Image (spheres, rainbow, N blue to C red):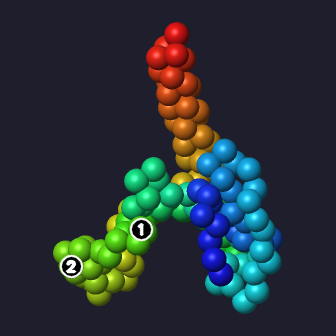
Amino acid sequence: MKIPQKANHIQIQNGHLTFYSEAGIMISQTPIKDSCFDKHSTFSAMSCDCSGHLLTLSVFDDEEDDLAYLSIWTGTSSVPLHWRDRLRHLWRILWVGTPYEDQFVMSLDGVRFLRTMVHMAETKLKDKQDAKAA
C-alpha cells in the first residue's frame, strides 16, 4: 500500500485505514483485512515536522483495562538508523521485550489532561502567530 505524499496523520478504526492532511482533511480511506489491529481498536499516528519521528496513540477494545497508549517512534524517515540506535533497540528487545522505552500509558483522566495540555499549547502558539502578524 502506498502512503499518499501529503499524508500527515493516519488513523485505523473500524477496519479502515484513513490518511489525513496536516489540516485534518481526509485524503483517502482504504479497507484493511487481516490486520493486527482489531476492527474495534483505534490507532492514530502523526509524523513530526522533521519527518524523523512518529507519534502513535492506541486504544484497544479487547484489553481488560481502559487505557490509552502513547508512543514516540524514532527512525521513521527514509534515512537508515545509526548503528548505535540499532544496537540500543536490539538491547531493549533482548532484555525488556520491546524496542521502545517511551510508551506512555494513560487512563481516561490522563487523556483528558493531555487534551488540555495540547489545547494550551495551541492557544499559546496561536497567540504568538497573531502577535507576529500584528
Q: Residues within 10 Å of mark 2 (few under 14, many from 20)?
A: few
In the picture, the disc for residue 4 is: none
x 54%, y 62%: residue: 56
Say which amino acid is labelled 1.
Ser
Whether residues under marks 1 and 2 lie with C-beta atoms below 8 angstroms apart, the answer is no
Residue ID for mark 2: 83
Categorize mark 1 by other alpha carbons within 10 Å: few (<14), some (14-19), many (20+).
few
Answer above or below: position of 45 versus 80.
Answer: above
- 48, above or below 63, in the image: above
Residue 69 image position (x, y, % from top left): 54, 62
Q: How many marks?
A: 2
Residue most toward the left?
84
Q: Is residue 44 left or right of residue 49?
A: right
List x then y, in percent, for residue 83: 21, 79
Residue 42 against residue 24 in the figure, above or below = below
Q: Is residue 14 visible?
A: yes
Query: Does label 1 or label 2 sit earlier along the sequence?
Result: 1
The three-letter amino acid code for the residue at tag 2 is Trp
Q: Nearer the viewer, mark 1 or mark 2?
A: 1
Residue 75 pos. (x, y %)? 37, 69
Question: Which quarter of the figure has residue 114?
Answer: top right
Q: Real-space Cα distance between discs 1 and 2?
A: 15 Å
Q: Which residue is mark 1?
A: 77
* Residue 103 coordinates in the image, percent (x, y): 44, 63
Element under label 1? Answer: loop
Q: Which residue lies at the image location 36% right of the left edge and 77% below the top edge? A: 99
Relative to 99, 56 lies left or right:
right
Please tell me which residue lies in front, 85 or 38: 85
Q: Secondary structure at mark 2?
A: helix
Residue 40 in sight: no
